[in-house]
């Protein structure tokens, strides 16, 4: 496949992450030739979703990778033209950060031999041989009374019903082997994200029609820790008035404040004195109670100490505008994981002619004398010329970055046996909690039930994210121990069955250096934010630089509305139109023929024949004109073909179908 690639493309995209896939789909949709390549054997890059088996491979690959892979070490120098120079590309990213995978349950369930013997002994006592059982009533003595037997039956049935009511649902006991056997049923995101219902990503999915490749579930509840207890956050009007944790006075204050935030653009005078000041000070000015302050600040606005008043009001407004669009929630989550979103845009790119090649990368960027990228040199030794080059974060040379960021993101993925707040339904929950050790680094928790298609039944997947300090376990262990402290699977708190701790580079801020070629564009990677809106804005900004006068990802046509007309159909239409013209000329010549002349078949026409013939000619002429006009419209194209349906309907109503017309036309030709 790699050796058969064309030698020239309009756009070459390195990396299949989310922003790279969006731009690749946009260029392909607008008719550009796109080459989309990735060094990995999977799509989505740092945005990917893996099962537990894929997580193990990803861990080994990151721990054993060295800068510069084998193909780069043994690469051939690219052939250069006059005035060209070479810029080397980075090899496989060697992430030496801590990645720890651990099973917290036993390989198998050990059953003590004593309990097994006791169970077997009990069975032997109760299961007496037939000859030792009480004699039947046929012998005459000890016969039961029918009424007593009926009462005994009713009593036993009542006891069974009571036991069923009092019996608690049995808790499934997981083992490490059972988790390994179900490895295909887990979908674990490396960078879990949610979507605001009225956010940029949802609008782009709808407009581009990529939404048909994905399915979503609503984040059904927002939770928070209030006074050491998990509580549901009242977000909508219905939640506020149905909440038992908020007094009537607090409900009125909260609704009044949320209404103001939703329309704060109309009342700039109300917060003018707090512009540029922390959002926390503005909330104190509004005199919210501690409970309502906690709900707004931590769960709705998801603010920190660095959040200004303008930012806090916009975040709250964005949250409120997303409520109610897809139910009583502000967020959506993609089924099967966030890694499905980049793959959806890759599918759109491929549909419109984009070329994909995995396990291939570029070893060099070839730059001409005008400081523009004119080609790349692939790991297969091929020179591919391009007009624009788009680089994902792991493909960007350090010389093209304005400054390197040392910011880290600490992440943990947990598989648990129950929800942090059990309920009758499978709730998809999100928590945004302040941190006691460092309030500037809050913690985001996303709990996914089996209905989100990321785990099997009787299990949950939990994503824990926080701005990192270098040690993900130290950053996340306190909150994990608070919420998931169950040591046994039968405890009230959720028990951790499997865990993964890892650290990611925060690649959300990418600024090109002054030496970056003018047609080379750098894209960001996943950051600490919970949504994908910033990625869409960044991709749109690059699109406007390259194609300022073209629409960004317009809606593709419906395949059912596309009708393909090949050359054979066009020739048939043209031939049919000419045949009807010959019929018209023949009919007109017969009308103009004088009496007593011969027709084409050589028969002499009598004086009586013209009268009969003239009637027939008039009828045939009328019918032939109708047929020729209709068939001419059929031959002109698709639009006329669709428009001719009304005429066919009129003909059918008058009792003249196409079959009758064709039969009469044949009789005319014969005559």
Image (cartoon, rainbow, N blue to C red):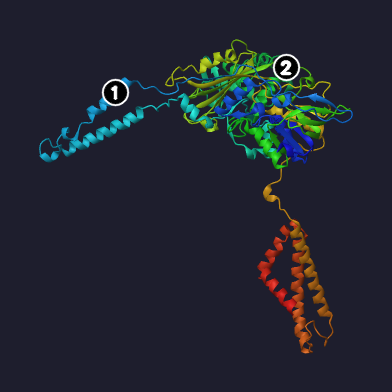
Residue contact at pointers 1 and 2, CB within 8 angstroms: no
Looking at the image, residue 517 lies above or below residue 307: below
Residue to which mark 2 is pinned: 405
User: Is 482 left or right of 560, judged from the image as shown?
Assistant: left
Q: Secondary structure at mark 1?
A: helix
Quadrant position of residue 532? top right
Quadrant in which the N terminus appears: top right
Whether residue 260 is visible to the viewer of this picture, yes or no, is: no
Q: Secondary structure at mark 2?
A: loop
Quadrant position of residue 282? top right
Looking at the image, residue 164 lies above or below residue 636: above
Q: Residue at x 76, y 87 (%)?
A: 609
Give the residue at the far top of this rendering: 437
Quadrant position of residue 363? top right
Looking at the image, residue 614 lies above or below residue 493: below
Residue to which mark 1 is pinned: 117
The image shows residue 141 at horizontal and vertical percentages of 10, 36
The image shows residue 601 at horizontal and vertical percentages of 77, 83
Query: Dot 1: within a 10 Å radius of its alpha carbon, few (fewer than 14), some, or many (20 or more) residues?
Result: few
In the image shown, does 417 or 269 lie closer to the viewer? 417
Give the residue at the far bottom of this rendering: 607
- Name the disc covering residue 153, or none: none
């Amino acid at each position: 496949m790699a050796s058969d690639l064309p030698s020239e493309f309009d756009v070459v995209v390195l990396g299949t992450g989310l922003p790279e896939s969006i731009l690749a789909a946009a260029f392909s949709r607008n008719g550009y030739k796109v080459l989309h390549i990735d060094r990995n054997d999977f799509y989505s890059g740092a945005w990917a979703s893996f099962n537990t088996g894929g997580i193990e491979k990803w861990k080994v690959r990151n721990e054993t990778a060295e800068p510069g892979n084998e193909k780069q070490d043994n690469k051939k120098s690219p052939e250069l033209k006059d005035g060209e120079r070479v810029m080397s590309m980075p090899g496989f990213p060697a992430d030496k950060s801590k990645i720890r995978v651990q099973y917290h349950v036993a390989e198998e369930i050990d059953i003590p031999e004593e309990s097994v013997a006791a169970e077997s002994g009990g069975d032997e006592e109760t299961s007496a041989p037939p000859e030792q059982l009480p004699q039947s009533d046929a012998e005459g003595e000890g016969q039961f009374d029918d009424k007593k037997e009926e009462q005994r039956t009713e009593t036993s049935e009542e006891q069974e019903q009571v036991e069923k009511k009092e019996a608690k649902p049995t808790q499934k006991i997981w083992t490490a082997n059972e988790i390994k056997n179900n490895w295909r049923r887990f979908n674990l995101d490396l960078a879990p994200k949610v979507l605001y219902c009225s956010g940029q990503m949802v609008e782009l999915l709808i407009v581009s029609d990529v939404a048909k490749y994905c399915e979503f579930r609503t984040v059904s509840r927002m939770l928070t820790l209030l006074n050491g207890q998990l509580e549901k956050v009242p977000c909508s009007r219905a939640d506020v008035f149905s909440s038992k944790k908020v007094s009537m006075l607090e409900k009125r204050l909260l609704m009044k404040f949320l209404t103001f935030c939703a329309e704060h653009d109309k009342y700039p005078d109300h917060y003018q004195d707090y512009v540029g000041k922390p959002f926390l000070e503005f909330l104190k000015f509004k005199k919210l109670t501690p409970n309502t302050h906690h709900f707004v600040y931590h769960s709705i606005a998801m603010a920190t100490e660095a959040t200004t008043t303008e930012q806090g009001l916009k975040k709250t407004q964005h949250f409120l505008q997303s409520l109610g669009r897809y139910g009583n929630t502000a967020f959506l989550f993609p089924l099967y994981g966030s890694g499905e979103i980049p793959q959806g845009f890759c599918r759109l790119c491929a549909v419109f002619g984009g070329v994909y090649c995995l396990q291939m990368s570029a070893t060099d960027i070839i730059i001409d004398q005008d400081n523009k990228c004119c080609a790349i040199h692939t790991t297969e030794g091929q020179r591919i010329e391009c007009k624009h080059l788009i680089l994902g974060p792991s493909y960007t040379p350090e010389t093209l970055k304005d400054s390197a960021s040392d910011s880290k993101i600490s992440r943990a993925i947990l598989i648990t046996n129950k929800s942090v707040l059990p309920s009758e339904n499978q709730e998809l929950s999100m928590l945004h909690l302040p941190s006691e050790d460092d309030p500037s680094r809050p913690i985001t928790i996303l709990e996914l039930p089996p209905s989100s298609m990321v785990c099997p039944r009787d299990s949950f997947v939990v994503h824990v994210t926080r701005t990192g300090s270098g040690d993900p376990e130290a950053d996340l262990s306190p909150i994990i121990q608070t919420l998931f402290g169950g040591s046994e699977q039968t405890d009230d708190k959720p028990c951790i069955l499997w865990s993964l701790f890892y650290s990611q580079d925060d690649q959300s801020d990418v600024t090109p250096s002054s030496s970056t070629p003018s047609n080379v564009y750098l894209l960001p990677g996943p950051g600490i934010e919970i949504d994908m809106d910033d990625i869409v804005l960044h991709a749109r900004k690059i699109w406007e630089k390259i194609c300022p006068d073209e629409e960004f990802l317009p809606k593709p046509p419906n395949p059912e509305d596309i009708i393909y007309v090949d050359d054979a159909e066009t020739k048939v239409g043209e031939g049919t139109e000419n045949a009807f013209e010959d019929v018209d000329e023949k009919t007109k010549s017969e009308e103009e023929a004088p009496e007593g002349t011969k027709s084409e078949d050589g028969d002499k026409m009598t004086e009586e024949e013209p009268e009969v013939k003239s009637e027939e000619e008039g009828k045939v002429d009328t019918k032939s004109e109708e047929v020729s006009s209709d068939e001419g419209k059929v031959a002109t194209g698709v639009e006329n073909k669709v428009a001719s349906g009304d005429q066919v309907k009129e003909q059918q109503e008058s009792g003249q179908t196409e079959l009758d017309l064709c039969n009469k036309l044949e009789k005319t030709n014969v005559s």
